[in-house]
Image (cartoon, rainbow, N blue to C red):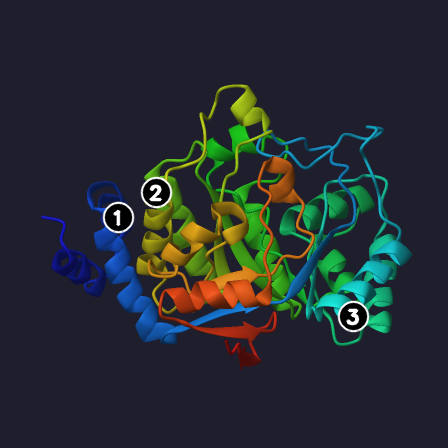
Amino acid sequence: MCDVDYVRSIVNNGLSKSDAVRLFVECDFRVLAKVANEITEKVTGNSVTFVNNVVINYSNICVAQCPICAFYRPPKHPEAYVRSPQEIINAVREARARYGVDELHINGGFNPDLTIEYFEEVFSGVKRAVPEIIIKGPTAAEVDFYARVWRMSSREVLERLKVAGLDVLSGGGAEILSEDVRKIITPYKFDANTWLRIQKEAHEVGLHTNATMLYGHIEQPHHIVEHVMAIKRLQEETGGVLMFIPIKFVPWNTRLLKDGIVKGPAPPEYDIKVIAISRLILGSTIGRIGAYWASTGKRLASTLLLSGANDLVGTMINEQVMKQAGLREYTTIEELASIAREVGRRPYLRDTLHRKLIEVKP
């Protein structure tokens, strides 16, 4: 019988891949959530963290054209754009003055017309204009693409971006770290091993990273388990991962939905299982697991805070990828703090590197 005591005993004895898959498939989501929540409370107490950040996409032009994505536009599309360095710098300056943001989250598509000098101008210009801002981005997928376009090694790209002002590598591009899934949802992106390699290279050159997982499309439970275990091994090897963020696939306006490969979003019970099994596998290896309200919605995010998650990721001012996929939610520091308090947690505003924690008082 898959009750709380059974799950506790399996976890305490060392969770194997087969154990984790069996728990995911056979156990009630409430049972997994309870044990995962117990572990989270041991790791970080009753704190819930998040960052105050602005999201700026430097370009929506992307030649990968993944069927999971509603954000990209092909080159020469009437809605395609590239933001100038000065436009980005001005937007960051305004977001800092208006909202007090501490982080710039910047990424985009695979735009073959952009140069390394463009990114260096953006990052160095942002740092000159707003020295206190922490720059997070791009993804390992972007690093790989641009390295090939520029005929550079991915390590050289990372080193130059770091010198220009990049502080943290975004966790995106991981999707699901299984090739049988990737060949359908991201057929023209790099493979799973390359994502892991670039993450390691980032850690080696002194950049921390986030790690993500896109779930709720065509994956099976064993893909979820394999992905989380790969992230755990990465962290055990390098210690450079700041947090793990499972991102729910939002199918509206994507080709996967239009082609009938997916029928709709995953049910809430599945979301809870994904967060819970992530905590059961990771334990304290990665302290923070994100409840990504921008993809799940804020109501479900509060439940995920009782299921193994303990971070609400960020205010995500100006987030566009999920909006293009069909979500239209916005939030504030006060609202995220309220979500945490509603489930008995104490909300803390953090910086990107999880160094500063400031409690958000009601």
Above or below, 357 relative to 40: below
Q: CA distance from mark 1 to mark 3?
A: 43 Å
Q: Which mark is residue 280?
A: none
Residue 270 badge: 2
Q: Is residue 123 visible?
A: yes
**Vertical placement of 263 versus 50: above or below?**
above
Image location (x, y in percent) of residue 282: 37, 61
Rendered position, 341 above or below 315:
below
Q: Earlier in the sequence, mark 3 or mark 2?
A: 3
Going by the numbered disc 1, the residue's amino acid type is Phe
Please name which of the two marks, 1 or 3, marks the residue nearer to the observer: 3
* Viewer-side residue, 297 vs 175: 297
Quote the CA–CA distance across marks 2 and 1. Answer: 8 Å
Picture disc at residue 97: 3
User: Which type of secondary structure does the marked residue at label 2 adopt?
Assistant: helix
Residue drawn at x 81%, y 39% is 112
- Disc 1, disc 3: CB below 8 Å? no
* Residue drawn where x is 32% and y is 53% of the image: 277
Which residue carries the number 1 mark? 29
- What x and y, as percent, mark residue 77? 81, 28
Please name the amino acid that badge 2 sits on. Answer: Tyr
Q: Amino acid at mark 3?
A: Ala
Disc 2 crowd, CA 10 A, few/some/many (<14, 14-19, 20+): some
Location of residue 252 in the rendering, given as x and y in whole percent from the top left corner: 55, 31
| Direction from residue 115 to residue 328 in the image, left or right | left
Of residues 185 and 106, the one drawn nearer to the viewer in this rendering:
106
Answer whether labels 3 and 2 touch (C-beta < 8 Å). no
Question: Helix, strand, or loop for circle 3?
Answer: helix
Q: Of the two numbered discs 1 and 3 on the same chain, state the one appearing first in sequence.
A: 1
Is label 2 in contact with label 1 (beta carbons under 8 Å)?
Answer: yes
Task: Label 1: state its secondary structure.
Answer: helix
